[in-house]
Image (cartoon, grey):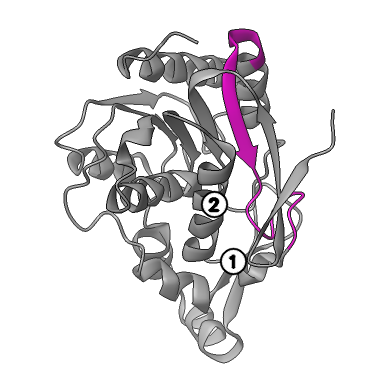
């Protein structure tokens, strides 16, 4: 595999891989502590090569091959990097594919582009195990007294990860910044077709969270696929097949299906 390319954002090297191809292109937005070489991103890259479709993936600062410290990351920081990557490395309409936290970034990215008069560049979204507002909706309500004390005294707490030998780190900066980026506070207008894929056996993001998100997307064409036995990763062969079909379907819905 070729080495990643990099661009500078606020003094940090952001790593990316890009495939040239037809529009609408596809932009991968990964999850918390994931990177652009994960199974789902690799599957989409291989599909894009076969389909002649433009594809962009990158690592947030503190993730994968990018510079920066993970513990210094916030939604605003990673959103800023995503906006910079989107604007400098893609052209024309794009389908955003956001996994877990990446779905939150995708929804915020659409909001920021709409504010700047660039909302027409979002052709559609595919959101996997979407975790918008996870700091306020999933983490804060479950904080223990010990975790609250550690946040106050140390500025972070650690939690065992099911996916890595290293613990997850949640900082007070991440949680406070999350409150400034909430999207599930009222109706969300994305002005594009959306397909949500949600595992029914997801231990990290309950499927009720996806149902709540759907209820806040009243103005758009939304498809929700609940996957029996699907976990948070959604990386089984049948999940990956469904992911590719969902992306192809949203591209077709966008009315710009021809590469």
Q: Secondary structure at mark 1?
A: loop
Which residue is located at x 84 percent, y 37 percent? 3
Which residue is located at x 67 percent, y 31 percent? 18
Front residue of this view, candidates 25 and 66:
25
Q: Position of residue 247 (x, y in %)?
A: 45, 20
Residue 84 - label: 2
**Sequence order check: which comes first, mark 1 or mark 2?**
1
Which is in the foreground here, disc 1 or disc 2? 2
- Residue indicated by mark 1: 73
Q: Is residue 165 above or below residue 256?
A: below
Q: Is residue 141 visible?
A: no
Specify whether residue 9 is painted magenta: no
Query: Count the marks: how many?
Result: 2
Q: Is residue 27 above or below residue 173?
A: above
Q: Secondary structure at mark 2?
A: helix
Q: Position of residue 172 (x, y in %)?
A: 51, 78
Q: Position of residue 34 (x, y in %)?
A: 64, 46
Q: Locate residue 75 relative to residue 156 in the image: left or right.
A: left
Region in magenta: 49-67
Which residue is located at x 48 percent, y 82 percent? 148
Q: Position of residue 177 (x, y in %)?
A: 43, 71
Q: Locate residue 125 relative to residue 11 in the image: left or right.
A: left
């Amino acid at each position: 595999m070729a080495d990643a390319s990099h661009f500078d954002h606020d003094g940090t090297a952001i790593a990316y891989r890009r495939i040239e191809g037809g529009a609408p292109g596809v932009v991968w937005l990964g999850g918390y502590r994931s990177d652009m070489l994960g199974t789902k991103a690799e599957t989409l890259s291989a599909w894009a090569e076969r389909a002649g479709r433009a594809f962009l993936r990158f690592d947030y600062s503190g993730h994968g091959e990018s510079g920066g410290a993970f513990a210094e990351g916030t939604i605003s920081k990673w959103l800023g990097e995503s906006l910079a990557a989107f604007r400098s490395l893609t052209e024309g309409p794009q389908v955003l594919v956001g996994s877990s936290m990446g779905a939150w970034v995708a929804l915020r990215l659409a909001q920021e582009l709409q504010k700047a008069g660039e909302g027409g560049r979002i052709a559609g979204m595919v959101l996997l195990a979407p975790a918008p507002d996870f700091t306020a909706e999933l983490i804060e309500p479950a904080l223990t007294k010990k975790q609250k004390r550690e946040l106050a005294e140390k500025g972070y707490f650690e939690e065992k990860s099911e996916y890595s030998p290293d613990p997850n780190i949640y900082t007070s900066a991440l949680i406070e910044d999350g409150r400034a980026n909430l999207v599930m506070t009222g109706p969300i207008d994305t002005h594009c077709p959306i397909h949500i894929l949600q595992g029914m056996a997801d231990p990290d993001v309950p499927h009720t969270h996806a149902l709540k998100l759907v209820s806040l997307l009243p103005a758009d064409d939304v498809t929700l696929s609940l996957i029996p036995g699907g976990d948070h990763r959604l990386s089984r062969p049948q999940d990956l097949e469904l992911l590719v079909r969902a992306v192809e379907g949203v591209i077709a819905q966008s009315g710009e299906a021809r590469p």
